[in-house]
Amino acid sequence: MTALVTGASGFVGSAVVRQLLARGERVRVLVRPASDRSNVQSLAVEIAQGDLREPASLAAACAGCSALYHVAADYRLWTRDPRELYASNVEGTRHLMRAALEAGIPRIVYTSSVATLGLHADGSPSNEDSPVTLDNMIGHYKRSKFLAERVVDELVAREGLPAVIVNPSTPIGPHDVKPTPTGRMIRDAAAGRIPAYVDTGLNIVHVEDVARGHLLAFEVGQVGRRYILGGEDMALRDILAAIAGLVGRRPPTIRLPRPALFPVAMVAEAWAWLTHGAEPQVTRDGLRMSRKKMFFDSGRARRELGYEARPALTAIADAVAWFQRGA
């Protein structure tokens, strides 16, 4: 069996590849010509060069595959041109799913995100059935992932796309080479560059558990059904305190009022725009999202897939250790 993995040069995708290889699977990875391939360069994989935004490049990548893990996504909370997010996340998903249908791939796992799920105002954990609409999506990243998931839903219903959907929460751990927004936070907190916090919370999960959840979804997940792949709910204050404890620093004790950070975010975004710089550490969309605690319940995945996740502190320790090794 040959499994095609998109996003394999990225964080979650490379973890999925490693687990497939450990099970003896043949793996083909779709990478863009200009992608950083450091996450896969030492792995025994077949390289298929292509781009989700170029449908013609996807047919060859899908040919002869009996499994597809579509993990790739443009994960940025700020960009100079939001159209890039929709081109990759929405239309790119549509292109790839159609190529998979034409190639007759019998089983697909699509990596969505908990960003597409409804959040509860009281901070209680959300699940796959928590009410949500497109109007609830804050920012272009969340909107693009919401619309991409709807593309998959429609193709499952109308054309029999054999896809199972997984919704990872906040993966952390080794091989976050870019890094992701959460990875940047962990790296910077370990270096003592985050002296304060806002009152919010995240569901922290080890990236290797998320990858294993993908394989479980492929094996026993129900087509068209969503499964949250999460771990442990933690307040941001406690995440930062755990990081500080691991590196021997004092944890931040200053709780910042969220409104006071919006001018900072505006300046940071303006500077990034003017300088064509990297995504700012603080963005207005990120602050808006932090108004609600992003807590999630992985009960369905546990019951139906046999999914389990290790403690969040273990995931945090592995992430900190990996960033420190690369420092």
Image (cartoon, rainbow, N blue to C red):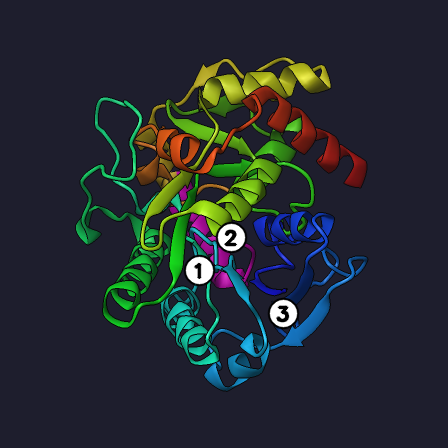
Nearest to the observer: residue 164 or residue 252 = 164
Q: Is residue 311 visible?
A: yes
What are the residue bounds of the magenta stretch? 264-278
* Residue 272, magenta (yes or no): yes
State the separation of the CA atoms marked 1 and 2: 7 Å
State the separation of the CA atoms marked 3 and 2: 22 Å
Q: Which residue is mark 2?
A: 279
Pointer 1 with pointer 3, Cβ within 8 A: no
| Quadrant containing the N terminus in the rendered view | bottom right
Label located before the other in sequence (3 or 2) = 3
In this rendering, would 118 be left or right of 286? Answer: left
The numbered dot on residue 31 is 3
- Residue at point 37%, 22% (across, down): 199
Nearest to the observer: residue 178 or residue 28 = 28
Label located before the other in sequence (1 or 2) = 1
Label located before the other in sequence (1 or 3) = 3
Judge the density around disc 3: few (<14), some (14-19), many (≥20) Cα neighbours within 10 Å. Answer: many
Pointer 1 with pointer 2, Cβ within 8 A: yes
Say which element carries label 3. strand
Q: Which residue is mark 1?
A: 79
The numbered dot on residue 68 is none
Residue 171: image x %, image y %? 53, 38
Q: Above or below — where is 265 with respect to 246?
A: below
- Residue at point 64%, 35% (across, down): 187
Q: Is residue 192 visible?
A: no
Q: Nearer the viewer, mark 1 or mark 3?
A: 3
Residue 21: image x %, image y %? 71, 53
